[in-house]
């Protein structure tokens, strides 16, 4: 590798390192050789979920009583970094959709629902997804229109969700609905666990610029009857449960973005050493060396900041508004780093960077979803400003 410093032992213990080696071996054997084929197929095989579940990868950070393994922030980072090492964001998004679908259930769901849903997902037998975004709402969660009307021991759900990761194949869909039509904004929103075989649920697959291996869908709910027992938390209190996972999601995306940037640097550096122009390696050209150093500087800064903020989360250090602001800014910094490095890598690779099969080409296509998903740059900056009292 061109520049990939050993993580500080103050943050990563021997246990972290041991699990990193396990996950890295799994990725090298079960994921990396297949990412091109899975991209073209638009799917990862269900068997991959089961294999990841058997190894305990899917359960990291989840309660032991439901089949998970309690873990600190840095063990989660280990998993995110090593899966990102395959250089295929679509695979990572598909395999990790339970990371946004399950946390509301873990945090506020009823015990019976938890025991029925969480274990098979962590075992890789079922797929979980989160359905918040709507065609008319975007990042404005409080403006959602999907309605759930109580009818005896069921809710009747009507509406649409879009850009849903794992939306085509999810068995359990944690869905934001409006249960109090008279309430305004964030009030009156609830979470329902809608099962994939519910009558009235239709799915339309979406074609994307990147993340091809991750199936993404628009979900249509037409008089879907959902048992009241599938209510996640209290009725009309869903917005708070939705917000609980945003900080973790943004930290995870920052970790992924830095790793993808690193992959771009490594590929560009290797190409520059091997590619000869006018009788000398490309790496001997000062302009190329400067590009590589510019990439390394940004990655070093972004990685250091990511680890520092992960430690703040781990230690619960600092006022919450400040932490929310810093995590929001972190997502912007790290995804901009990914964007810069992907662009520079493609430029250094030249024509080859425009060809399918290079990691830089795939990551270049995946930059924008990282900069938009989980909160766009504009939303992140506005949120940071509000938290900082600007």
Image (cartoon, helix red, strand yellow):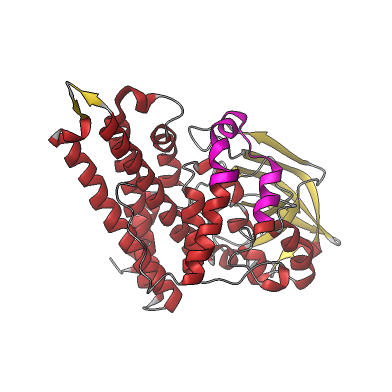
Q: Is residue 173 above or below residue 230?
A: above
Residue 32 painted magenta: yes
User: At 61% from the left edge and 58% from the top edge, which residue is drawn?
Assistant: 57
Report the number of numbered marks: 0
Which segment is the magenta one?
28-53
Q: Quadrant of residue 44?
A: top right
**At which x and y percent is residue 341?**
31, 42
The front one of 124 and 179 is 124
Q: Nearer the viewer, residue 348 or 330?
A: 348
Rendered position, 141 above or below 32: below
Which residue is at the front of the view, 189 or 227? 227
**Whole-percent x and y of residue 288?**
19, 35
Query: At 56% across and 60% down in the image, what residue appears?
Result: 184
- The quadrant the C terminus occupies is bottom left
Residue 188 visible to the viewer:
no
Q: Main secondary structure of the magenta part?
A: helix
Q: Nearer the viewer, residue 204 or 7?
A: 7
In magenta stretch: residue 357:
no
């Amino acid at each position: 590798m061109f520049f990939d410093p050993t993580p500080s032992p103050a943050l990563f213990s021997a246990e972290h390192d041991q699990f990193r080696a396990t996950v890295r071996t799994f990725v090298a054997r079960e994921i990396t050789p297949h990412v091109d084929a899975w991209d073209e197929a638009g799917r990862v095989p269900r068997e991959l979920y089961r294999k990841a579940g058997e190894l305990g990868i899917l359960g990291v950070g989840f309660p032991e009583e439901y089949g998970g393994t309690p873990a600190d922030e840095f063990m989660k980072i280990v998993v995110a970094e090593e899966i990102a090492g395959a250089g295929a964001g679509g695979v990572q998004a598909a395999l990790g959709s339970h990371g946004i679908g399950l946390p509301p259930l873990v945090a506020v769901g009823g015990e019976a629902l938890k025991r029925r849903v969480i274990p098979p997902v962590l075992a890789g037998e079922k797929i979980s997804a989160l359905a918040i975004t709507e065609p008319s709402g975007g990042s404005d969660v409080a403006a959602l229109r999907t309605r759930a009307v109580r009818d005896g021991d069921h809710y009747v759900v009507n509406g649409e969700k879009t850009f849903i990761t794992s939306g085509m194949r999810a068995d359990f869909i944690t869905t934001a609905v409006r249960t109090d039509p008279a309430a305004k904004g964030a009030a009156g929103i609830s979470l329902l666990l809608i099962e994939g075989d519910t009558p009235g649920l239709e799915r339309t697959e979406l074609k994307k610029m990147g993340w091809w291996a991750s199936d993404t869908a628009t979900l249509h709910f037409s008089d879907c009857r959902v048992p009241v027992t599938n209510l996640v938390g209290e009725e009309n209190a869903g917005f708070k449960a939705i917000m609980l996972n945003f900080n973790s999601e943004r930290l995870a995306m920052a970790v992924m973005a830095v790793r993808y940037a690193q992959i771009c640097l490594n590929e560009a550096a290797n190409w520059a050493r091997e590619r000869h122009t006018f009788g000398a390696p490309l790496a001997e050209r000062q302009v190329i060396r400067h590009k590589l150093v510019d990439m390394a500087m940004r990655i070093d800064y972004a990685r250091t900041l990511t680890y520092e903020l992960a430690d703040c989360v781990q230690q619960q250090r600092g006022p919450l508004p400040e932490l929310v602001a810093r995590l929001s800014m972190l997502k912007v910094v790290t995804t901009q780093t990914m964007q810069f490095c992907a662009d520079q890598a493609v430029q250094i690779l030249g024509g080859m960077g425009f060809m399918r099969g290079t990691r830089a080409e795939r990551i270049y296509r995946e930059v924008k979803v990282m900069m938009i998903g989980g909160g766009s740059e504009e939303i992140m900056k506005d949120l940071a400003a509000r938290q900082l009292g600007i």
